[in-house]
Amino acid sequence: LRRQLPFEPVATEEVEEEYNVVALLACTECDYFRFKPHEGEVVYERRGRCPECGSDLIVEGVFRTEADPSAFPDHGELRELKEALEEAGYEVSDHRICEDGSIEFEYDRRGDPRELARRLAELGFTAEPKGEAGAIRVVRHAVPEEEPAHLPLLLLSVPCFAWAAGWYAFRSPWYGLEFALAFSVIYFGKELAKLRVAAREGLRPRLPLVLPVFYFPGVYTSIVRADVKPMLSESLCRIGVAGLATGFVLSTAVFVLGSLQRHVPVKVQVVHNLWTLFLAGKLGLKANPLTLAGWAGLAVTWLAALPIYPLEGGYVMRYYLNTRLVKWFSAASVLAQACLRWYHVAFIAAFVLFRYTSSIPSDRSFLDDDERKDWGPLLLLLLILACLASPAPIGLWPTDKLVNVPKAYAWVFLR
Ligand SMILES: [Zn+2]
């Protein structure tokens, strides 16, 4: 046969219990082919007519696969994928369809990975480099699973717990409400910014996974969930930067707005970070629901900046470092927090580490991994980590029982 459809049959000793059988139908005259679930076809049997040229279709092969038969590309899709590669500047020299339904393209000259990522996402495919240089593996998006029912509830819990925290801090449900509203604006503003950027990067984001952090009811961090596997580390970096920058700007705005309002006696102590210390020096110290919400927003932003994949700081780190190093950073970050006795932060960081960071395949790589990097995001990340770190992060301490806070630090909020 003239067509180039080298298809690797599975060796019999490798066959698992669970597999599908697919048949490959190909036209005897033109390039047309399609895969279908096997229904008793015999190899070289004639099966219908080619929709492209009307010649005979014959069964070119019957194969076992662990993939769903619908994952295999058809003739039109293969042509579109090839066009996408070529229009992105890749010079395709060869291709083969693999037994898991993915397609491997070999190319002589590399093109623009950003353009390729955009075009593949439009076609419903995703790609990653294949080991050696000069080849990529293209695979259809996985069918999205059902949205878990607890996610909207977790989102709803953000303003509810914030209200409880504000009520506790000011001993008034009305001040609690004001705090909850201001905090929700910051929190959801930050999430929306991330979702918008993720959508612009073609990732089809879904509801974020909200993770509560104990000690300060209403303080959360979150994980971006997307239907499409990101093809560019730059996309992740942009999502991270969007979250960090929005969190920082919104929180600062609320903090400044609060310091223009009147003082409200507060029953808890909250510890400065460098940035609030600077702002308080310029604007004067005032405790009220708005300054507390601004402070809590900054604490959430700091938490998200921890270099733990897939938090925002981890996304930025992944842009510069490979997966293995990012994993080490994540683990070191958890250890450092445990050593500082920030157990509440260490706990959530450890949860993220074991649940999410550890499940990233270590050989995972992006189409733009070897591109030149822009250093702006790293600078932003380091600034946020340094300026928003507080000796006692994310806590409402009812008394003076703080253990690991230097005495020289001024409190933001006095009784
Ligand atoms: Zn044909």
Image (spheres, rainbow, N blue to C red):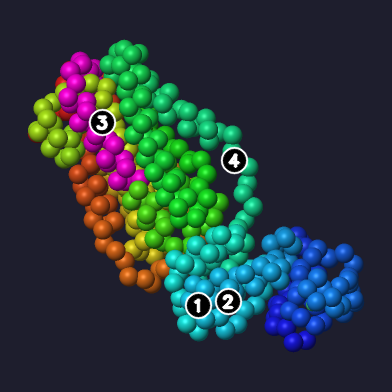
Q: Is residue 132 visible?
A: no
Q: Amino acid at mark 3?
A: Val
Q: Which mark is residue 105?
A: 2
Residue drawn at (27%, 22%), measured in percent from left and top?
289
Q: Which residue is under mark 3?
A: 254
Instruction: Please report whichever mark, 4 or 3, sits nearer to the chain's N-terminal start.
Output: 4
257 drawn magenta: yes
Q: CA distance from mark 2 to mark 1?
A: 10 Å
Q: Amino acid at mark 2?
A: Phe
C-beta proximity under 8 Å, tags 4 and 2: no
Q: Relative to 267, does residue 356 appear above or below in the rendering?
A: below
Question: Which quadrant of the figure shows ligand 1?
Answer: bottom right
Q: Is mark 4 within 8 Å of ligand 1?
A: no
Q: Quick one: SS at disc 4? A: loop
The quarter of the picture where the C terminus appears is: top left
C-beta proximity under 8 Å, tags 4 and 1: no
Q: Which residue is under mark 1?
A: 90
Quarter holding residue 320: bottom left
The quarter of the picture where the N terminus appears is: bottom right
80 drawn magenta: no
Left/right placement of residue 83 relative to residue 357 reads right
Instruction: Provide residue 377's location: percent of width, then percent of height.
Output: 29, 56
C-beta proximity under 8 Å, tags 2 and 1: yes
Q: Which mark is residue 191?
A: none
Left/right placement of residue 284 relative to residue 339 reads left
Q: Quick one: SS at disc 2? A: strand
Q: Mark 2 or 1, which is nearer the eye?
A: 1
Q: Which residue is under mark 4?
A: 147
Part of the protein shown in magenta: 243-270
Q: Amino acid at mark 1?
A: Tyr
